[in-house]
Structure formats: C-alpha cells, structure tokens
Image: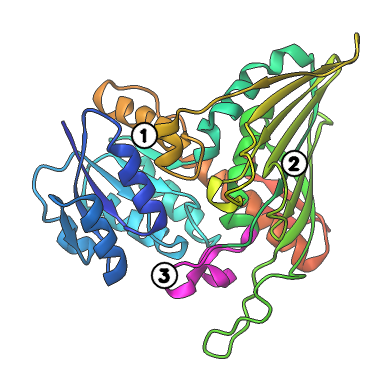
Amino acid sequence: MLRYALLGGGMMGQEHINNLALIPNAQVVAVAEPNAAMQKRCRRLLPEAEILSSLEELLKIPNLDALVIATPNYQHAEQLLSLLRTTSLPILVEKPLVTEKDDVSRIREAAAKHQAPLWVAMEYRYMPPLVHFMNQLDRIGELQTLSIREHRFPFLKKVGDWNRFNRNSGGTLVEKCCHFFDLYRLILKEEVSSLYASAGQNHNHLKERYDGEVPDIIDNAFVTMEFASNRRALLDLNMFAEGSTYQEEICAVGNVAKLECLIPGPAVTWPDDRPQPEPQVVFSPRHPRGPIAETVLVEEALQKAGSHHGSTYYEHLGFNNAITSDGPVEVTIEDGLKAVVLGMAAQLSASNKQAVEILDQGLDFRIVK
C-alpha cells in the first residue's frame, strides 16, 4: 500500500483524492490545507486521514511514499523547491509548474538532483478520447497542421479568488492553456520555433471587484505557432461559450486525411433535461470522402471521480507504476516547463502585439526584432 500525502485540498486536490481512492494500492493518509471549508470537505472524503494546515506539519507524517502538490498556481514553484531540498520522495505536481520566468532555471536545476520520480500533472494527455485520437494519427499520413479549439465556461470561483489575476495564475494562456501547449509538443514531436498571439478580456469578470481591483485575466485568444519543419498549429480559446456542444475540438490534418477529437464539457455545466453528448473521434479521408465517427466511452466511476473524463485516474496509474515498478515518468519536469514557457511567450506576444521567438529548445523566448 502506497501512502500518499496531498498539499492542497481544494477542487483539484479533491479530484486527486477521489481518483486515488479507485487505485487498490493507494491510500491518502494526510492533506495539508489551510482553508477551513476545504478542510471540512477533505474530512468527509477521508475520515481516517490527518487533515493539517501546513506543509511543515505534513512532512512530519511518518512513512510517506508519495506527495501530490495541488495548491494555487503561484505556490507551486516555491513548494516544489522546498520539497526538493527536504525530501527524497516521489512527487506529482499540478500544472502550471511555474508562473514566473525566473523560476524555470531554478526548478530545472533542483529537479536534476532529485532521484525519485517527478511527474507534472498534464491530465489532458490521458483523456480516453484524446488517447484514442493520438493512437489513430498514423492513418492521416504526414501530419501538417494541428488545431485545438476550446470553447468553454468562465473560470470557476476558487478559494480567495486567486485565479482572477495574472500575478497569481501566470495568466490564462499559462494557467489553462499549458495543457494544450503540452499537447502540441506531444503530438507534433517538435518544439515551437515562433508564435503570435492576439487576446483580450471582452466579457468575463469585468464587473467583479477584489479590494477595488478589477480582474485582468483574458477570456479569449488566438495563438498561431510555427515549427522548423514548416508545419503550423493554432489555438482558439473562448471562455464565455459554455453553450457549446463540445468543449474541446482537436483537429489534425495530414496529406491523406483529417482526424478530429470532440470532447464535451463537464456534465455539471449541462442542463438536467439535455442529453449529455459523448466524446467522438472522427476520421475524414480525402479519398473516398465521408467522415467515419467513433464514440469513445468513459467508465461511469471515472466520470464521477472528477471533471477530466477519467484522465486523472490514468495519470495516477502511470505515476504509481513509476514509483512501484520503475516505470517511465511520462510527463517530465522538462515537459512541464516547456508547456509553461509557451504560455508565457503567448502572454507576452498578446500584450505586446508582436511575434515571439522560442529559444533554448523550448525553455526561453524573446520578442522577434
């Protein structure tokens, strides 16, 4: 039995708790969470676990086997650095790995000295419809363009409303879209060479005030990316489109065919009297023409355990295997950092209205002069 401790018991922390409960050899024995309301929810989920208030208390728990960081974004870097200095345990850390550019090199250097598995939580990699989509990509010939459209609901309320401000989240293109930048790298197996972003805050949170301050997070964006191989990618984000049938639409086009992955949003965003759409993967060859659609079902227990179509469960299976059987770390610190760097570069491009060049194999960037 692996004894897990969680740092952070909010919305995502509770999703980790629910999914670890589905893994036979996993037991969450402690959670560090300073917020009283979140502590109460964690106690309901884990009546036998220790619910604590700080990282320092958490590290006093004996015989731990693994740690999970699921705190607000702006805390990830310092907490991970602290753990890398004080423990040799395996660690799974939620995205985004960092929110400040200066932390990229600090995390990279510290992580290189850690001998146990370090895994960055990129749940989208493990969504069953996306896995099926990626397994079918060889059918389209030579992949030339890749686009991801996410049309979804606004950011949810979080403890302390930390996600309303760029300084806390890293910005929308870091906080939300590092998932997608990770997918571009994973699918195209190549680093972005340059990008251009156009973004704005057109609708969401404009009437909200926090100590008199207006939220500054963007709610829509287009990001175009170029690769050295002359391939291109596109991100289309809109966060006031919760009426969409599908929340994510991923489209890969090759010289033989097109392949699409259509993923509905969480069931909680749909009215009770409307049928829930099913995830689809659609294959559309050039010859003979005509789409062929497949439904990709997700087990009900996995759907109930979180809002990511079962992906958190499969992510934990991989992390568990890396701990117990020397399995591969499938989402490395380098992967996590490179996804965030692309988000930061896109934020810079949008604010300066200039193209940005990606440097150092995806770990740095600068405005194109």
Direction left: furthest residue: 62
**Residue 228 percent coordinates (x, y):** 78, 33
Q: Nearer the viewer, residue 172 or 50?
A: 50
**Residue 305 percent coordinates (x, y):** 39, 41
**Drawn side of residue 308 relative to residue 29, left or right:** right
State the residue at coordinates (70%, 18%): 137
Direction front: furthest residue: 273
Identify the residue position indicated by label 2 in the image: 193
Question: Tag 1's secondary structure?
Answer: helix
Lower position in the chain sequence, tag 1 or tag 2: 2
Identify the residue position indicated by label 3 in the image: 159
Amino acid under disc 3: Val
Answer whether residue 280 is magenta in the image.
no
Lower position in the chain sequence, tag 2 or tag 3: 3
For discs 2 and 3, the disc positioned in front in the rendered view: 3
As drawn, 28 above or below 220: above
